[in-house]
Image: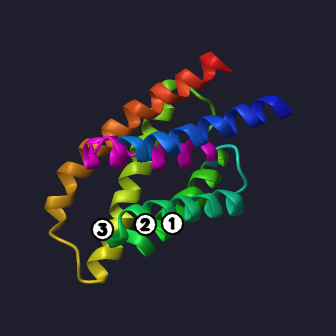
Amino acid sequence: MTEGTRWKFALFVAALVVLHFVLRVGVGLGFLAPDLLVVALLLASRRLRPGTAAALGFFLGLLEGAVNDYILGAASLALAVLGYLGSRSREWLAGDDPLTLVAFFFAGTLLYNLLLYVMLAVGGAGGSLMALLIPSLLASLYAAAVGLGASTLYRTLA
């Protein structure tokens, strides 16, 4: 990868992160907006080493926790784990075909929601598992569609 494409990709990931907070906080959509932090992390983790991807996930979790202090530590840990696993998935998840990317984004978002649920439930703040299942599946489908669109947009622009 050349230096120019590395900077373009870093700016694209940063734009996704900024757009996440603009939609969720600035526009006030809250949880109706797609989880672009997870999409940005999963896209970046495919190009980063596991430790760097985990550090990026931790940083993004701190940003998310700064906005929503209810999930501060849980979001940091969940995104760090997700970044690490996303980076390790390069070994068995090859290619950029759309079906693979949709499955990657779907599974990543679902895992993030599950990790948040487990950490908040252990802390005594979680609800029932069924209350998590349907919204998480829909949010994962939403993030997978948006992630596929973002990946396609980057490939056409770069």
Q: Mark 3: which secondary structure?
A: helix
| Residue type for callout 1 | Leu
Quadrant hosting residue 9: top right
Label 1: few (<14), some or many (≥20) within 10 Å?
many
Cα separation, mark 2 vs mark 3, equals: 15 Å
Q: Main secondary structure of the magenta part?
A: helix
Residue 134 is a magenta residue: no
Quadrant hosting residue 36: top left
Whether residue 7 sits left or right of residue 79 in the image: it is right
Residue identified by numbered label 1 = 62
Q: Mark 2: which secondary structure?
A: helix
Label 3: few (<14), some or many (≥20) within 10 Å?
many
| Residue type for callout 3 | Tyr
Rendered view: 156 above or below 117: above
Residue identified by numbered label 3 = 117
Identify the magenta region. Answer: 24-44
- Are dots 2 and 1 in contact, CB under 8 Å? yes
Q: Mark 1: which secondary structure?
A: helix
